[in-house]
Image (cartoon, rainbow, N blue to C red):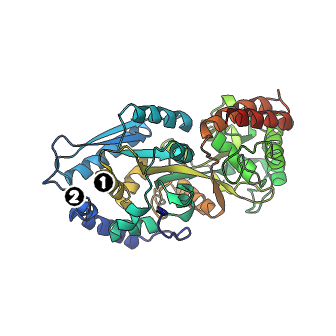
Amino acid sequence: MNESGPSRAPLASPLSRRRLLRLGAASLTAVSAGAALSACGWSGQNADRSSTLRVQNWGSADEAKVYDATFAAFRRQHPGLKVSNNVVPVTLWGDYVSKLAVQMASGHSPDLLNLGMEGTRLSVERSMLAPLGSRVKDSPAAFREHISELPKALLDAYTVDGTLYAVPNGWQTMMVYCNPRIFRARGVELPAADWTWEDFLSTARRLTGGGVMGFGLPWGFFQLHPWWLTNGGYPVTDDYRKPNLSDPRVVEAVAFVRDLVQKYKVSPDPTSVDVYSQFAAGKFAMIGAGRWPLPGWSAASFTDYTAHPWPKRVSHTTVVGGSGWALSTRAVKPDIAWAAIDYLLLPSSVARLTEVGQALPVYPGIGDDTGDKAADRAFDVLFRQLDDSRPVAAPAFYDTLESVAMRYLQQIVSGRLDPAKGLRAADAEIKEAL
């Protein structure tokens, strides 16, 4: 049976307020009337008072509060339902999925999962996720309309071998933030839209000095992707079956990053510095980031930044990551979990999480009018990155790929290991582990 998802349109233009309200009203009407659940036999009248929807979730303490409030509102439409919303912080997605697999194997499976893009293929490989294609097809029109509004790039990232396994609920990308005050003080122009690696390096060198570093290099597997992608490289093969770290394009990109630190001295050791707070403190003229530092900057009234596409070597292609709602293959209440996804996709639900969360909303037009003009302008640039992006490399062996790659990359960037030699060794170690 083909469990592929619905037909998907390319990235939509920002939704108008009227469009958002119409979508929200349509879904609220559907939920209130029980349309989302009528086909699966759930209603307040037949609900067992001990019934509990078990949710495995992730996020910050602030996000947990918003999720709890959202699930409380969902419960009011389904009398007798309880929700156990387990929100945990995530450092490594491989660890998150491994712990979840143990939990499911021990008979304590959640019904609804909030899963990072990095864990999708790994979870599918372990038979942890239920296919969603037929559920989308059989859902009420209001829900299908919500799905049709989701960016194609995000839906594709949760589709494995033609089968949709998760519904995106938020996403991230990477671009370069610049401090225009520092640029003006140094007599340096802000980057042009089509700037290159060479332009970037020249700019970083001119901005370095007087207690300021040209570029704050964020450290992490996801954060390094733009350098690989803008050079036409990717750390796994196109079929996601083998590592590809020794590809000359990946090696060249890693060598460039190493040289930013060791040769040109425009970036400090990235493994031991919080580039986001230091950027706000005026210690960096440029950094790479997604949406995640914006709430903190707004709270600190820091607005001296502009957002720009990643500099290109062969393209401006950047990375996209995120998380999505999935159903466990061992869910006790898959139907009510699916109805919860419908509720969580309401524009009003998405908007509440956008206000406090780190991710970008799945609907263009939400969260881009915060009153913080710098953040709102950054939102616009962030959304446009989806048009030229590629998902974070997340094969079924993601946990091994990330841990091994970062161990070797740390040695390379610190100057202790040659890029080509180190990445060949990383490839070999991963292949042996597989």
Where does the image place residue 255, in percent across and percent down from the top left? Answer: 83, 41
Which amino acid is tagged 1? Asp
Q: Quadrant of residue 19?
A: bottom left
Mark number for residue 54?
Answer: none
Q: Looking at the picture, does residue 350 appear above or below residue 245? A: below
In the displayed orientation, state which residue is furthest to the front: 1
Residues at circles 1 and 2 in contact by the CB criterion of under 8 Å = yes
Of label 1 and label 2, which has the lower sequence position? 2
Question: Which residue is more in the foreground, 159 or 22?
Answer: 159
Callout 1: SS: helix
Q: Which residue is mark 2?
A: 41
Where does the image place residue 63, in percent across and percent down from the top left? Answer: 40, 42
Where does the image place residue 114, in percent across and percent down from the top left? Answer: 43, 45
Q: Quadrant of residue 143?
A: bottom left
Q: Which residue is mark 1?
A: 335
Question: Which residue is more in the foreground, 276 or 252?
Answer: 252
Density class for disc 1 (Cα within 10 Å; few <14, some 14-19, many ≥20) is many
Task: Residue at 44% x, 52% y: name it.
Answer: 354
Q: Looking at the picture, does residue 402 appear above or below residue 132? A: above
Task: Residue at 33% x, 40% y: name it.
Answer: 85
Number of numbered labels in the structure image:
2
Where does the image place residue 328, in percent across and percent down from the top left? Answer: 40, 46
One can see residue 92 in this view: no
Callout 2: SS: loop
- Quadrant where the C terminus sits is top right
Task: Residue at 20% x, 53% y: name it.
Answer: 78
Which amino acid is tagged 2? Gly
Mark 1 vs mark 2, CA separation in Å:
8 Å
Task: Residue at 85% x, 38% y: name it.
Answer: 420
